[in-house]
Amino acid sequence: MPIRVLTVDDHPVFRDGIASIIQTQADMVLVAEAQNGAEAIEHFRHYRPDVVIMDVQMPDMDGIEATERLCNEFVDARIIVLTTYKGDVLASRALKAGAWGYLLKNAVRKELIDGIRAVHAGKRTILAEVAMELAEHAAYESLSAREIEVLRRVASGSSNKEIAQQCEISEETVKTHMANILAKLRAKDRTHAVAIALKRGIIVDLDQG
């Protein structure tokens, strides 16, 4: 029996690209496509694919939430997250949600085909450069939910005073959060902290695919 695959991505052109790759493989068949996490769950219930190729940043429901919901509902769900983000924090979230693999879109063809076969066979698959990022930052202290929210607002260009008003906290509290953020990320300043957070996937660039 061929490996039955479901692809989930909000970009039709990218879904078409994956479909063309799968169609060249004698041991695989594309059973369905979804454009967001909610649709992925519906399709999984209907088609029960062997492997799901899941994007991260999507409207309505992102790939991390969809992965967690699918894995909670179906213990045999095998999901490969395929994304542009190679940051260790986002990869860690995906794996904790239940993903069996984490691959990057800029290395699609061979890695994806090999990954589908590996996951279907019950093996984990993580791109080497992502695994290195995970290992490199394993000892780093995680940011709290409030610190991540503050950092997101810094990334959007808000000042400490504006963040204080938006989050309904004092400006001194914002400064304390920023001091903690800089220490945890080992950043030199606010701009450096945002750059690190984007690189590691602590916050994501909504303009990326």
Image (cartoon, grey):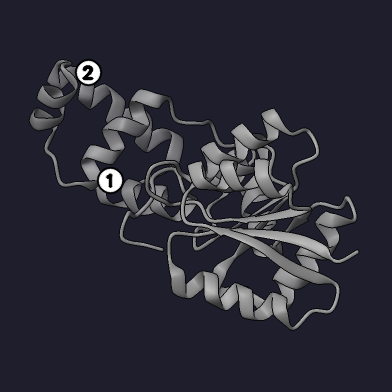
Q: Quadrant of residue 174?
A: top left
| Figure check: 31 above or below 25 | above
Q: Is residue 141 visible?
A: yes
Type of amino acid under label 1: Asp
- The structure residue drawn at horizontal position 82% and vertical position 63%, both measured from the top left corner, is 3
- The structure residue drawn at horizontal position 36% and vertical position 33%, both measured from the top left corner, is 148
Q: Which residue in the structure is indicated by mark 1?
A: 189
Q: Which residue in the structure is indicated by mark 2?
A: 173
- The structure residue drawn at horizontal position 71% and vertical position 60%, both measured from the top left corner, is 5
- Nearest to viewer (mark 1 / mark 2): 2
Q: Of 129 and 59, which appears nearest the observer?
A: 59
From the top left corner, tell me how far across and down residue 22 is, in percent.
71, 75
From the top left corner, tell me how far across and down residue 64 is, in percent.
54, 41
| Figure check: 155 above or below 162 | below
Q: Quadrant of the N terminus?
A: bottom right
- Most extreme residue toward the bottom, as rendered? 24
95 horizontally vs 186: left or right: right
Secondary structure, mark 2, is helix
Secondary structure, mark 1, is loop
Type of amino acid under label 2: Thr
14 horizontally vs 4: left or right: left
Q: Of 105 and 171, which appears nearest the observer?
A: 105
From the top left corner, tell me how far across and down residue 168 is, in percent.
15, 17
Total residue callouts: 2
